Image: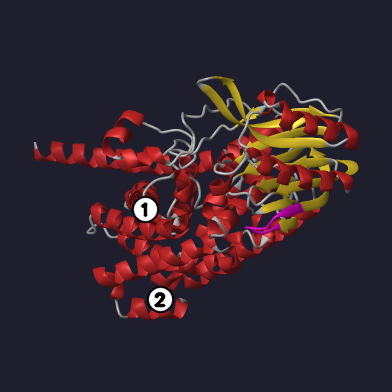
Amino acid sequence: MIAMLKRIEAQTWLRSSKWRSVLLIVSGLLTGLCVSFPAIGVLEWVSLVPALTIFFSMSSDENVPLRRLYRGGLIFNYSFSVVIFHWFFYMYPLEFTGVTPVIALAIVLVATLGLSLLQSLFGALIPVLLALVSRGRIVKKLPYLQVIILAGLWCVREWAQTLTWTGVPWGRLALGQASIPLMLQTASWFGSYAVTFVIVLVNGCIAFALLHADRRRLCALVGIGVFALQLTLGGIIMLTDTTRSSGDMLKVVAIQGNVGSADKWQTSNDETFEIYYALTVQAAEQGADVIVWPETAVPVDFDGLTRYRDPLLELAKDHHVILVLGAFVHQSADETYNAVRLIDETGTMHENFYAKRHLVPFGEYVPLRPVIEAVLPFLTEISMLSSDTLAGEDAAVFETELGHIGALVCFDSIYEQLGLDAAREDAELLCIVTNDSWFFDSAAVYMHNAQAKLRAIETGRYVVRAANTGVSSVITPTGKELARLDALEEGIVTAEIEMRSGMTLYTLVGNLFVYICLIGCAGLLAERTANGIYHCVKTAKSKK
């Protein structure tokens, strides 16, 4: 790839709009593939080079208008986003929703192409902001700062995607390293954003070297050094654990009934319950200490149905096992939560419950409902629920004889702040209950499992992940899988783990690293703006 880019530079293809677009598309597609399929994640350390070479070249040239940079950013980001959201097509024809094939196709197209565009409109600002800073006095004197600035902007962009319902942090660059846990360990210090920063920095050094022959040796040394440092720190962090274990080994089990949404809502709840109950009995008889069911494994409220609740209470008491159950909780006719309930080893169902905090737009509630109903009414037909689900407000960590257990529900697990909240409230084990059956065995289910690896590393906790149709897994605090059951299989996932207490650095400082990046970039933009205003005023005075 580097040799190819040297030839491109030599032939001045970077000046051709046609070839710029081709390179941006290739770079976006390849990076998206790395994030979607971490088995090829090693390519992510060079996949951004074509795009960054173009961004650096254009941003430094004051003759290039900002709209052209925005267009280039849009081409790259859209290519990237379409790949990471391609799995929406696996939902077609959405038979379990009862919609017509035409409406199903419209929904899938809007989800894939529309969501990709929504994410790209903001991401396309990165090269624009880079240009604004690069054309300032400071960066003109120190042009290599472009590399650091771009890495910082990328981190801020990923963080900003966690702030509103329109932002979906599904395309974190760190996910591309999910198959190389050594590369992810700095997430325990500064979150996945630190991993993203390093990936962009290494790619940026290569791109900068291609554009500046007089700095190639320096850029190469810095890029290699940063990559080596990431590896070294990964090894050191894995060897120097900052969290503490209880010392007692526990057997945890994730139940995977392989009952998907199409079946769960259209077959008898009794049949579904029998599947999960039989697997739970099997796990309990094998000596499980904690058993985790997936998200709304049986789509009922256990409080209102004693024929389901009582056998579970008895099983927990007889086998002295803790049951962590995905379930609905109906507080009233118009107050429903997608929740996690816990039955302790005494056979008592705890009154408190964890309610999902990041609800899925259009799946569990309709944002801007009046507007959506008027403009895109078919999007309101996706949900299997008759009314909007309500969001929870806190971590609601469960206290048990074995320790404190925190929970996350499905979409929650892609937002790092929720995992941090649980760890800060003394959760010693994280249980993720999810329903990924909408996506069958597509890349989505494996990408979602990779997000759980980040939450484990960030918090320094073991993670037990139970999915209706998979992937179910048990993950160590270093992001390694102790056990896993792949998609569309029925069974149990068993592993021995330790309860963990104490805090990782990231749990203590949160997104401090991102805030530093944000302040640094904002400061350079402010300097550029102030300098521009000063020159405008000076020019105006000279004309007088």
Q: Is residue 287 visible?
A: no
Question: 19 left or right of 138?
Answer: left
Q: Which SS class for mark 2?
A: helix
For this orientation, the residue located farthest to the top is 332
Q: Which mark is drawn over residue 179?
A: none
Residue denoted by label 1: 101
Residue in the image at 52% along x and 50% along y: 438
220 vs 142, nearest the viewer: 220
Question: 2 left or right of 443?
Answer: left
Q: Is residue 88 visible?
A: yes
**Which color scheme does this rendered protein use?**
secondary structure
Inspect the image, locate mark 1, and give the three-letter code of the amino acid beneath it.
Pro
User: How far across and how far down the image is residue 180, in percent?
Assistant: 66, 62
- Main SS of residues in magenta: loop
Question: 249 left or right of 141?
Answer: right
Q: Which mark is drawn over residue 5?
A: 2
Looking at the picture, does residue 524 appear above or below residue 69?
above
The tally of labels here is 2
User: From which residue to which does the magenta span run?
Assistant: 485-492
Inspect the image, locate mark 2, and give the three-letter code of the amino acid beneath it.
Leu
Where, by quadrant of the figure, is residue 526 drawn?
A: top left
Residue in the image at 52% along x and 54% along y: 439
Whole-angstrom CA distance, mark 1 to mark 2, is 45 Å
64 vs 110, nearest the viewer: 110
User: How far across and how far down the image is residue 456, in percent?
Assistant: 69, 46
User: How far across and how far down the image is residue 504, in percent?
Assistant: 72, 41
Does the residue at mark 1 contact the one at mark 2 (Cβ under 8 Å)? no
169 vs 126, nearest the viewer: 169
Residue in the image at 55% along x and 26% along y: 336
N-terminal-most mark, 1 or 2: 2
Q: Which SS class for mark 1?
A: helix
